[in-house]
Amino acid sequence: MYPAELVKPMREDLTKVGFEELHTAEAVDTALAKEGTTLVVVNSVCGCAAANARPGARMSLQNAKRPDHIVTVFAGVDKEAVDAARGFMVPFPPSSPSMALFKNGELVHMLERHHIEGRPAELIAENLVDAFNEHC
């Protein structure tokens, strides 16, 4: 588990643009039971989360079509919530950072770490925007 003071700015990178933090399995279950579309970002302390994932997620929200709900869990911090979120992402293996778009609780789009690492934030945002345009 990472110290709260270490991850605070990494959390705020998403919460300042409207992402809701989920800390428990119950909170994840509740979020994914909501009608409409939900983007789940599995946040991380790694460099690719800072350079690519979080900026890409933020940029994607500038699109006209966007998810009804945007939430985040933090790998290495919110173990219960991360495990619950990853349970909804099966058959994809656990990875962080990662991003999943759900529609009425069903997984419709997934970005795994290997889709994020080494790719510019703009490309990640473009990938998400395509998914938003199709599903939102």
Image (cartoon, rainbow, N blue to C red):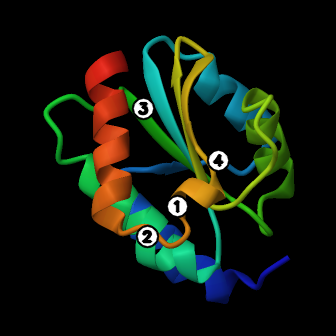
Q: Relative to residue 112, is residue 108 drawn left or right?
A: left
User: Which mark, by number, is residue 52?
Assistant: 2
Nearest to viewer (mark 1 / mark 4): 1
Q: Quadrant of residue 28?
A: top right
The residue that label 3 is drawn on is 69
Characterize the local packing of mark 2: few (<14), some (14-19) or many (20 or more) Cα atoms within 10 angstroms.
Answer: many
Q: Would you place residue 77 above or below residue 78 in this image?
A: below
- Residue 39 pos. (x, y %): 48, 37
Q: Are marks 1 and 2 in contact (CB under 8 Å)?
A: yes
The residues bearing labels 1 and 2 have C-alpha atoms spaced at a distance of: 6 Å
Residue most toward the left?
64
Q: At numbered mark 4, what does the secondary structure look like: helix, strand or loop?
A: loop
Say which residue label 1 marks.
116
Image mark for residue 22 = 4
Q: Amino acid at mark 1?
A: Ile
In depth, the one of 114 and 86 nearer the eye is: 114
Q: CA distance from mark 1 to mark 4?
A: 22 Å
